[in-house]
Image (cartoon, rainbow, N blue to C red):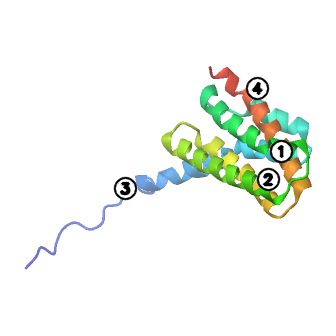
Amino acid sequence: MGYRGGPGPQVRAGGPPKRYESKEETNEQKKTSNALLNIYRLFKDGKYDEALKAAMEYRTSQSRSNFRKIYEMIIRTLEPIRRGKNIDDGVKNKILLELTKIDITIEYQKNRGVLEEDIADSLKGALAEVRSYLKDNKFDDARKATEALELALNAVLAYQITKNK
């Protein structure tokens, strides 16, 4: 026969077990997460002063060199949309493919710890919007989103990331 006795469940006085205490931290992190995405959306909505203020208040320890690599990939890929020229299906498909590659690269860099999670998730969210507009042939919306993303990237680069040399 096996052992059937033993002490009952142990309850710690003074609150929930330790493993539940991290939930509050997670909720607090969610309040500040995707700040770059919020800056992008403010620019997209034409709230330029609010977007610049948010960029100035944004805090990151992201290194400039790692951010610049992704920045340049994004800007180079979105250039045909930003220029405003008509985009045929061949060019559109090439841009969609490049945006997908950038998304994969961002996720990889995030998992390696090269890109901060907030920046990576924000970039992926903004790029998903651009991809969605392109897929639906909403080129004016894609152009507006592209311009907003470029403004957000430039603002964060200028106000925050260049400080982190």
Task: Check contact, mark 4 vs mark 1: CB within 8 A.
Answer: no
Q: Quadrant of residue 117?
A: top right
Horizontal and vertical percent position of residue 26: 56, 50
Question: What amino acid type should be assigned to the residue bearing mark 4?
Answer: Ala
* Sequence-earlier tag: 2 or 4: 2
Q: Which residue is mark 4?
A: 158
* Sequence-earlier tag: 2 or 1: 1
Q: Tell me how far mark 3 sits from mark 2, CA to CA.
A: 62 Å
Q: Tell me how far mark 2 sits from mark 1, CA to CA.
A: 9 Å
Q: Tell me how far mark 4 sits from mark 3, CA to CA.
A: 49 Å
Front label number (1 vs 3): 1
Q: Which residue is mark 3?
A: 12
Q: Quadrant of residue 62?
A: top right
Q: Which residue is mark 1?
A: 80
Horizontal placement of 5 versus 95: left or right?
left
Answer above or below: position of 23 versus 46.
Answer: below
Q: Which residue is mark 2?
A: 91
Horizontal and vertical percent position of residue 69: 64, 33
Question: What amino acid type should be assigned to the residue bearing mark 1?
Answer: Pro
Q: Nearer the viewer, residue 99 or 3?
A: 99
Task: Check contact, mark 2 vs mark 4: CB within 8 A.
Answer: no
Instruction: Give the SS element for disc 4.
Output: helix
Residue lying at the far bottom of the rendered structure: 1
Horizontal placement of 51 versus 97: left or right?
right
Q: Tell me how far mark 1 sits from mark 3, CA to CA.
A: 61 Å
Question: What amino acid type should be assigned to the residue bearing mark 3?
Answer: Arg
Instruction: Give the SS element for disc 2.
Output: helix
* Sequence-earlier tag: 4 or 3: 3
Instruction: Give the SS element for disc 3.
Output: loop
Horizontal and vertical percent position of residue 101: 63, 50
